[in-house]
Each structure stands twice: as C-alpha cells, then as structure tokens.
C-alpha cells in the first residue's frame, strides 16, 4: 500500500505543479500584444466601423463621447492594427461602463478591405468599488478617495469617502453621494445631483493668518447640495447650469451656521485630432459660481475660472501646455479661494508659504515635454504662476521637475525655484 | 493497463484544477525526427470551440504549450521540457490560418501561414520538440503534452482612467482557474529511445 500511496501523491502533485507552472510562464499582457502584432488580418484596410451593427452616425450611437467618436472614426481608412482595436475595445468598455467589448472583423466590399464591428455586452446593473485618486505628497502627506458605484441603465449612484489635503487650503474629509442620469429624455441632456458632508482641518499658519487679518471665517464642517443639468450643444461642446447650496458650521461655538448658496454654470470644449503621424488633444473650460443673497447666501461673490489644455504627441514624444486663470469678486468662502502649490500647480512649492489663506486672483501656466520609455513616459516640466489679492502686488513663482507616468500612475520630483536653496518635493500616486 | 495504473491515472486526471480535455489511448505519440523528439496527436483538435470562434472573428488567440519527458506517468521529476507560446490568427478573406511561435525577441519569431486548421495544429506540435540528447537513453520514459489557451480577460478592467477598480481585483484573485479556459492534457508511454530509433529507421526506409 505504501507504493500505491506514493503513486497517488505523485498523481495529485503533477497537475498541481503544472497548474502552478504554466501561468508563471513569461507573457501576460505583453504576450497578448505580441500575439495581436502577428495577426494576419493586419494587412487589410478598415472600410467601416460599427458598434453592435450600428454605424457611428446612427442614432443608436448619438451619445458617444466626442473623443471616443473621433478615435473610432480615425480607424476608418487605416490598416487593421489589432493592438489599436484592443485598446479601442477597452476604451469603449471603460467609458460606456459595459460588461465586455470584443471586436469582430468582417469582409469588406472588396478584397483587401474589412469592416470592424465592436460587439458590446451591457450590464443590467453593476456594482464597482474604485479608487479614482490616490496621492502621497512628501509635505502634504496622503490624499485619496474610494468610491462605491451602482449603475443601472443610464443611472449611476456613487458613494465616495475622501480625505483631500491637495485641492484646497483646508484638508477636507468626509463623504460625497452623487446621482447621475446620463440620458434625461434625450441623449443631449444629463442630470446630476450631489450631496457632500466634509469636516475641515486647518494648518496653524492658516489659523494664525486668519486671526491676524480678521474677516476670514474658518468653518469646521460644511455640507453641500448641488443639482446640475448638462446640455450637449455640439459633440465636443457642453454647457452646464445648476446650483450649490453650501452650509458651513463655524469653528466658534454658539456662532450661527453660514450659507454660501450659488448659481453655477460651466462651458466645456474637448476635441481630439488624430493622424497617422500625430495626435492632438485640445480642451478648454470656463466655470462660474455666483453667490447671491437671492438664494439666501451670506456670501455675495462671483468666481470665474478658465482653463486651457493642449497636448501634442508624435511618435515617442509629447508636449503639453496647460493654462489656468481665475478671479473672485466680492466676499467668497474659504473653499472657493484659489490655491497654488498643489500636485498640479507650482509643483514643489509649499502652498502655505505662498499664501496660507489662498488667493482671489490666480494665473498659472505649465509646460511639459515627455519621451516614451518602455510602457511609460518620462517628463520634464516647468510651472510658473502667481496668486495674489487685489490689495497686494502679484509675485511670479517658478518650479521645475521630472515625472514618470505609466498609465494612471505618476511619480514626480519637483523643485521650487527659490534663491539660495534646493528643497525637492516628492509625489507619488495616480490620477493627479 | 493494470488496475493500479488505472487508479493513478484517474486520480491525476480528477485532481486537475482546470478542465483538461481529451485524454484517450493513442491520442499522443512520440517519434524521433533528426535531432529532436517530436509528437503527433491525430485526434487533438484544439482549434475548436471558443478559441475557434474568436479566430473566425478575426481576433488573435494565444496558446501556451508544454511538452515534458518524465520517468513515470505522473512523476513530479521532469527529465526534459519544451515550452512554447503560439499566436494564431485566421485570414478572413483567404479563410486560412496563420501561426507564429513567439520568441523572447521579435526577430526570434517564426511563422507559417495559409494553413488549414489541422495543418496549423500540427505545425504547433512540431514546434514543441525536445532535443534528442535530453531524452534518457537507458530507461523508459513517458511523454506529456499540456496545452492551454490564454485568456485575455484576466488582464482587463483592473486599471483604467477612473483609477483602480477594486471589484475587478477581488474578482481576479478570488476566482479559481476559469472553467471556460480550454486546456488539453495528454500522456503517453512508456517509450524507450532504442524502440523509437528502430521506428525512425523503419520510417526512413519506408
């Protein structure tokens, strides 16, 4: 029987060893890419592209995002690159929140030409947990957000937990609940409503400066209720209008709550241009938040912000230009004030050295040059910007740095240009 | 086959965690071809089912194959091994198959095209050869072929523009081997090198 037991153990061990061995073989995603490169159909030219049998101009595809539509259109007339088709499938699945997308090649109208049909599989309802942002900043420490998302048809409900010390003067920690309907009667109208409940933490330098200057209200909690409608005017251009009802609890016990109720509006334009030799992305936005006593606001103000972004890619190289300008008129609450020295602006600078209270005027520009190395891109960047008050003189500040991006992951080393010393700041995370 | 061997074989097949298909007597045969030991599997049709559907949709399908030589049928000791990765595609205009054996570098690849399904499968098996010098010359040995289709779904959906999708990550690590992932496991033997040499001579003369 001893012999039999030994043989039996061997019989069990072999399949287990094989199962363990084979997945460890080198390959994975690179094998999939390499396999796609050898596809014999790459010799053919794409004649047309459809989604579940419907052409891109058909009404079934009227609500495709502009950038995605541009990308799908750019496939027509090009050689059938299977890796590109796989990427487009993945983009479709991500952006349209689909269960699965696969491409099917069909014979075209004449030899040498093919038709590509993306077969999509919708989710009746889905539940996801996602980490849309995570950042470690050597000065500001951690910022992050975790979202639980339920989607059904055109509706989505998101419950997010966040702690953010990067975007505002204060660190805000709490929950955000968002409901979105991406098709309100028509593909051209979307509706969203958000409720936030945040607790605030202030740096001692902010508290000291607020006490010194007076007239600044530092709240210890705030709640926001913000409905918004978005209208698709033309595919790359959207307009949004809404309101924001924000209530703030004072840090001083016994003080009544304050309201910053505002009308909100925004204009966005995003366009992608793609050619065999280059890719360009252009985006611009304008946003307005106007606090008015007509809505019961204790803060009458208007906040205007403009952004412009342009990116050019050719081969392994990329160049990027980003501009931000903003102005606040009137008396605005702290969360509306502009900040420089974040993970996206004047990288490397300590925002509390620039102004511990933030500012009501801002201009910032960032230029970057990148070169693709393996799967990622190494970048050098130069940031310049100024944050000021109308009663103070504006001072231009600069910073330089290097970054390595791979997908959504970014590592950054930034150096503020300060006379007499070099104090690098390190940042790591994703989607910042 | 003795009763004991049958129990051992059944236990081995039963404990296989992925679905292994088609282990039948005479399904796998070894032969000597010049400096190599090669296999034939006339009843093995792995270009079938879901992989074939994907190919006929114009997609690429990757297979990983492993050929091993062992002293007994289910031995954990492997005396020689050949592992290769193959990428198949199907020309939707010519309705013929193309197959590429993937190398570490693009220049190390080699391919065959304009093949029928059976020709493509045989080309794949012919390229899973073991060097003759690695075959034991003084003892019997068994040959095993383990072939499985790569599942591209394992690499998608975890990382995307919205960030890391924790749900997909949990799904991936919490899931056993995909039941739909095609796998073929074939054994044959025992062989003796001397016997294979005789048949090689016969076939050369014949």
Image: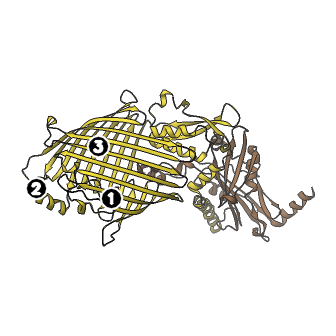
Chain colours: A yellow, B brown
Label 1 belongs to which residue? A346
Q: Nearer the viewer, mark 2 or mark 3?
A: 2
Nearest to the observer: residue A119 or residue B198: A119
> Does residue A14 sit above or below A297 in this rendering?
below
> Does residue A41 sit above or below B76 in this rendering?
above
Whether labels 2 and 3 belong to a single chain: the reply is yes
- State the image quarter where residue A170 is shown: bottom left
Label 3 belongs to which residue? A177
Of marks 2 and 1, which one's residue comes earlier in the chain?
Answer: 2
Label 2 belongs to which residue? A214
- The residue depicted at 77 percent of the width and 52 percent of the height is B26
> Does residue A343 sit above or below A309 in this rendering?
below
Chain letter of mark 1 equals A
> Residue A120: x percent and y percent?
52, 37
Chain letter of mark 3 equals A
Local secondary structure at mark 3 = strand
What crowding class fits label 2: few (fewer than 14 Cα within 10 Å), some (14-19), or many (20 or more)? few
Chain letter of mark 2 equals A
């Amino acid at each position: 029987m001893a012999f039999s037991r030994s043989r039996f153990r061997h019989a069990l061990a072999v399949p287990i060893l094989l199962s363990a061995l084979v997945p460890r073989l080198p390959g994975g995603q690179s094998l999939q890419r390499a396999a796609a490169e050898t596809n014999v159909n790459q010799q053919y030219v794409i004649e047309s592209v459809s989604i579940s049998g419907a052409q891109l101009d058909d009404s079934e595809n009227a609500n495709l995002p502009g950038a995605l539509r541009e990308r799908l259109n750019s496939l027509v007339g090009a050689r059938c690159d299977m890796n590109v088709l796989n990427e487009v499938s993945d983009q479709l699945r991500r952006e349209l929140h689909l269960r699965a997308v696969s491409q099917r090649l069909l014979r075209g109208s004449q030899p040498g030409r093919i038709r590509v049909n993306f077969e999509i599989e919708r989710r009746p309802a889905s539940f996801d947990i996602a980490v849309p942002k995570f950042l470690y900043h050597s000065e500001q420490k951690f910022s992050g957000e975790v979202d639980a998302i339920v989607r059904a048809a055109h509706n989505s409900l998101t419950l997010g937990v966040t702690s953010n010390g990067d975007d505002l003067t204060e660190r805000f920690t709490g929950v955000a609940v968002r409901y979105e309907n991406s098709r309100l009667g028509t593909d051209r109208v979307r509706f969203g409503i958000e409720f936030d409940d945040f607790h605030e933490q202030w740096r001692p330098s902010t508290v000291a400066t607020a006490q010194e200057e007076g007239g600044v209200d530092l709240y210890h909690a705030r709640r926001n209720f913000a409905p918004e409608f978005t209208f698709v005017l033309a595919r790359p251009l959207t307009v949004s209008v809404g309101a924001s009802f924000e209530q703030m609890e004072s840090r001083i016990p016994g003080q009544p709550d304050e309201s910053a109720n505002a009308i909100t509006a925004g204009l966005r334009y995003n366009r992608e241009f793609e050619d065999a030799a280059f890719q360009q992305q252009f985006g611009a936005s304008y946003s307005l938040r106007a606090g008015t006593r007509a809505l019961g606001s204790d803060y009458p103000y208007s906040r205007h912000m403009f952004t412009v972004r342009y990116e050019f890619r050719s081969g392994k190289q990329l160049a990027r230009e980003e501009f931000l300008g903003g102005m606040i008129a009137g008396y605005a609450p702290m969360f509306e004030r502009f900040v420089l020295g974040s993970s996206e602006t004047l990288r490397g600078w300590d925002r509390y050295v620039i102004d511990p209270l933030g500012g009501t005027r801002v201009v910032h520009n960032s230029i970057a040059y990148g070169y693709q190395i393996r799967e990622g891109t190494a970048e050098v960047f130069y940031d310049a910007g100024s944050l000021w008050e109308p009663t103070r003189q504006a001072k231009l500040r600069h910073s330089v740095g290097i970054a390595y991006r791979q997908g959504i992951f970014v590592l950054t080393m930034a150096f503020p240009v300060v006379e007499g010393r070099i104090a690098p700041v390190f940042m790591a995370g994703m989607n910042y | 086959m003795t009763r004991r061997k049958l129990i051992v074989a059944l236990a081995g097949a039963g404990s296989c965690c992925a679905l292994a298909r088609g282990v039948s007597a005479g399904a796998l045969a070894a032969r000597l071809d010049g400096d190599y030991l090669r296999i034939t599997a006339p009843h093995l049709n792995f270009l079938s089912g879901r992989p074939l559907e994907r190919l006929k949709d114009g997609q690429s399908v990757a297979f990983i194959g492993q050929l091993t030589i062992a002293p007994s049928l289910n031995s954990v000791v492997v005396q020689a091994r050949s592992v290769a990765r193959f990428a198949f595609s199907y020309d939707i205009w010519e309705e013929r198959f193309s197959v590429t054996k993937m190398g570490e570098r693009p220049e190390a690849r080699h391919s065959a095209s304009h093949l029928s399904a059976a020709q493509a499968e045989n080309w794949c098996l012919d390229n899973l050869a073991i060097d003759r010098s690695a075959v034991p010359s003084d003892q019997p040995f068994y040959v095993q072929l383990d072939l499985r289709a790569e599942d591209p779904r394992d690499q998608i959906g975890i990382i995307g523009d919205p960030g890391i999708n924790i749900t997909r990550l949990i799904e991936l690590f919490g899931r056993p081997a995909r039941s739909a992932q095609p796998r073929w496991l074939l054994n044959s033997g025992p062989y003796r090198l001397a016997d294979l040499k005789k048949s090689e001579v016969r076939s050369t003369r014949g």
